[in-house]
C-alpha cells in the first residue's frame, strides 16, 4: 500500500510538472511548495517597491509569482500597462475574490471590487450618469469651497499664534468632511464624537483590508481563519459599517426629517430616489446602496487627503518650485482672498505640480488588482484564466526609458505637454485606465487642485525650527492609498504678514 501511495504521488508530480512546463511563464523568484511566494511578500515591506526590485533583478517588465494556490503576474512598464488596461482590457478587467471584500461589499454588490459582468456594467453606467457626471460634480462646488474656507480659517488661527500645524491631520479632516457632506449630506464637527466614529470606521476598514486571511490562498483551510479570530474580527467590522450605513438610510427615510429645498441632492439621496423610482436596469436594493457607499467611503476619504499631503511634501522639499507656484497663484488672484474653481483652468503650473506629484507618489501604487477572464498572451508569455494581475503604477511612473530623470521632482516636464491623468498616457496612470478606471477621477482632481491652490495662496510655509528639507521623509505606509507614514508638520505664515 505504501509503495502504491508513493507511485500515485509520483504520477501526480509528473503530471503537474509537465502541465507547468508546457506553459511559458514569465520569470520570477523561486517559490516554496504549497505557500509559493507568500513568505516573501509577508516580509516585503512596501510591496510596490519590492515588486519593482524584483522586476529589475530579473530584467523583465513582467514577473510571475504564486501566492498559495493563486497565480500572479506583475507588470511594470508603460507598454505592458497599455496591453493590460487597453489593448487586452476585456481579458484583464475582472477582479480577484477575497474574503474581506466579499463581506464588505455585500457579495460584490459594489463597483470597485465587483467582477466584470452585466451587473457591474449597469452599476458603472448608473454611477457615471447619476453620481459622477460633470453636472453632479459641479453641483457640489459650494460644499468644496465652504469646507476649504473652514480649513484655511483653522490654519490662519494657528498661524496668528505662530503654532506648527499637523497638515496630515488637517487634510484628513477635510477629506472626511467633504465625503460626509457629498455622500451622506452630513457635517460632523472635527472633534465631535460622530466625526471620531467616522474616522474609526475608516481606520477599521484600512486595517482589515491589510489583514491576512488563510482562505484567500488556501480555500480548504478556511477553518484556520475562524480558529485564530480573523473571521470574527471581519464580522465585527462589517457589522459596525452596516449599522452606520443603515442609520444614514433610516434617517433619510424618516418622514419627520426636515429638508431644505435649496439643498443639493447628495449621493445617498440620489441612490434612494433611483431605488424608489425603479429607474435602473438592475434591481437596486439596500445592499447595493450600502456597497456603493462603502466604495465612496474608502475611495473618497483617503485618496484625496493622501494626494494633497504628497503634493505639499514635494513642494516643501523643493522651495523654488513652491515659490514659482505661489507666484502664479497670487498673480492671478491678487487680493481677492481665495482661489475658486473658476481659477483652476488658468493655473497651468499648478496642474503641472499636481501631475508631477501624482507621478512620484501615486495614491494607489499597485492600482486595484485585476483578474484574467480567459487565456491570453502578454509579452510572449502565456497567461492563464484566473490569474491575478498587478499593475505597478509606482514603478511605471519611474521608468527611466519613459521619463527623463524619473526620480526628480520636475513639474516643468508637464508644461506644454499633452500628457494627462485620465488614463490615456500609460506612463502616468494613478487612477487606472480602461473599463476599470476610477469613476471619481474628476471630483478627486478638483478636490486636490483647489485645496493645494488655497494652501499656497493663503500661507507661506516653512519647516519647524531645526528641520531641514532633506530631513522630510517620503516613506509610505501600507494601505489602499499610499499615505505618508510620518505626519507632515509645518509652520504657516499668513500671506502678507512676513
Image (spheres, rainbow, N blue to C red):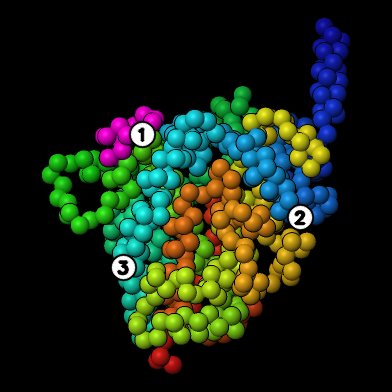
* Towards the viewer: 147 or 141: 141
- The residue shown at (30%, 32%) is 278
Q: Is residue 8 left or right of residue 193?
A: right
The magenta stretch spans which residues? 272-285
- Classify the position of the N terminus by image quarter: top right
**Residue that mark 1 sits on:** 280
Q: Is residue 422 above or below residue 7?
A: below
Q: Quadrant of residue 395?
A: bottom right
Which mark's residue is nearer the viewer, 2 or 1? Answer: 1
Q: Is mark 2 in CB contact (under 8 Å) with mark 1?
A: no
263 relative to 7, above or below: below
Q: Residue 487 placed where, x, y %? A: 51, 68
Q: Residue at x 70, y 68 (%)?
A: 407
Give whichever of discs 1 and 3 has the lower sequence position: 3
Mark 1 and mark 3: span between their CA atoms? 33 Å
In this figure, which residue is indicated by the disc labeled 3?
146
Indicate whether 150 appears above or below 162: above
Q: Quadrant of residue 333?
A: bottom left
Question: Does residue 62 appear in this view?
Answer: yes
Q: Which residue is mark 2?
A: 53
* Residue 264 magenta: no
- Residue at the (59%, 45%) spot, across then down: 434
Amino acid at each position: 500500500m505504501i509503495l502504491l501511495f508513493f507511485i500515485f504521488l509520483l504520477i501526480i508530480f509528473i503530471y503537474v510538472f509537465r502541465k507547468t512546463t508546457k506553459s511559458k511563464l514569465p520569470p520570477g523568484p523561486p517559490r516554496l511548495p504549497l505557500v509559493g511566494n507568500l513568505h516573501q511578500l509577508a516580509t516585503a515591506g512596501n510591496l510596490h517597491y519590492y515588486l519593482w526590485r524584483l522586476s529589475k533583478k530579473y530584467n523583465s517588465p513582467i514577473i510571475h509569482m504564486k501566492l498559495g494556490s493563486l497565480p500572479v503576474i506583475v507588470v511594470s512598464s508603460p507598454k505592458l500597462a497599455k496591453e493590460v488596461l487597453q489593448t487586452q482590457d476585456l481579458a484583464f478587467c475582472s477582479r480577484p475574490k477575497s474574503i474581506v471584500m466579499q463581506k464588505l461589499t455585500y457579495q460584490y454588490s459594489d463597483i470597485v471590487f465587483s467582477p466584470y459582468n452585466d451587473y457591474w456594467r449597469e452599476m458603472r453606467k448608473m454611477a457615471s450618469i447619476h453620481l459622477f457626471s460633470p453636472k453632479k460634480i459641479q453641483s457640489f462646488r459650494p460644499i468644496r469651497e465652504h469646507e476649504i474656507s473652514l480649513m484655511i480659517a483653522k490654519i490662519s488661527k494657528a498661524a496668528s499664534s505662530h503654532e506648527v500645524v499637523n497638515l496630515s491631520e488637517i487634510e484628513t479632516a477635510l477629506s472626511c468632511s467633504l465625503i460626509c457632506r457629498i455622500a451622506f449630506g452630513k457635517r460632523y464637527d472635527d472633534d465631535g464624537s460622530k466625526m471620531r466614529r467616522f474616522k474609526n470606521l475608516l481606520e477599521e476598514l484600512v486595517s482589515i483590508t491589510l489583514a491576512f486571511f488563510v482562505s484567500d490562498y488556501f480555500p480548504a483551510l478556511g477553518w484556520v481563519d475562524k480558529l485564530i479570530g480573523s473571521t470574527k474580527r471581519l464580522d465585527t467590522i462589517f457589522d459596525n459599517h452596516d449599522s452606520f450605513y443603515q442609520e444614514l438610510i433610516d434617517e433619510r427615510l424618516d418622514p419627520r426629517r426636515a429638508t431644505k429645498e435649496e439643498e443639493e441632492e447628495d449621493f445617498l439621496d440620489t441612490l434612494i430616489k433611483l431605488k424608489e423610482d425603479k429607474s435602473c436596469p438592475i434591481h437596486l436594493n439596500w445592499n447595493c446602496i450600502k456597497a456603493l457607499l462603502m466604495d465612496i467611503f474608502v475611495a473618497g476619504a483617503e485618496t484625496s487627503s493622501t494626494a494633497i499631503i504628497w503634493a505639499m511634501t514635494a513642494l516643501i522639499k523643493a522651495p523654488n518650485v513652491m515659490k514659482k507656484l505661489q507666484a502664479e497663484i497670487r498673480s492671478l488672484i491678487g487680493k481677492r482672498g481665495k482661489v475658486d474653481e473658476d481659477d483652476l483652468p488658468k493655473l497651468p503650473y499648478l496642474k503641472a505640480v499636481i501631475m508631477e506629484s501624482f507621478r512620484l507618489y501615486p495614491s494607489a501604487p499597485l492600482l486595484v488588482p485585476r483578474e484574467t477572464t480567459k487565456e491570453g498572451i502578454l509579452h510572449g508569455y502565456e497567461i492563464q484564466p484566473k490569474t491575478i494581475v498587478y499593475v505597478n503604477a509606482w514603478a511605471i511612473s519611474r521608468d527611466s526609458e519613459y521619463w527623463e530623470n524619473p526620480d526628480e521632482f520636475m513639474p516643468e516636464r508637464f508644461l506644454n505637454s499633452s500628457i494627462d491623468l485620465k488614463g490615456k498616457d500609460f506612463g502616468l496612470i494613478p487612477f487606472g485606465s480602461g473599463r476599470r478606471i476610477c469613476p471619481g477621477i474628476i471630483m478627486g482632481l478638483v478636490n486636490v487642485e483647489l485645496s493645494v491652490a488655497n494652501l499656497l495662496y493663503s500661507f507661506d510655509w516653512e519647516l519647524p525650527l531645526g528641520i531641514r528639507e532633506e530631513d522630510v521623509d517620503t516613506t509610505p505606509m501600507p494601505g489602499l492609498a499610499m499615505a505618508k507614514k510620518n505626519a507632515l508638520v509645518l509652520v504657516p505664515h499668513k500671506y502678507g504678514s512676513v
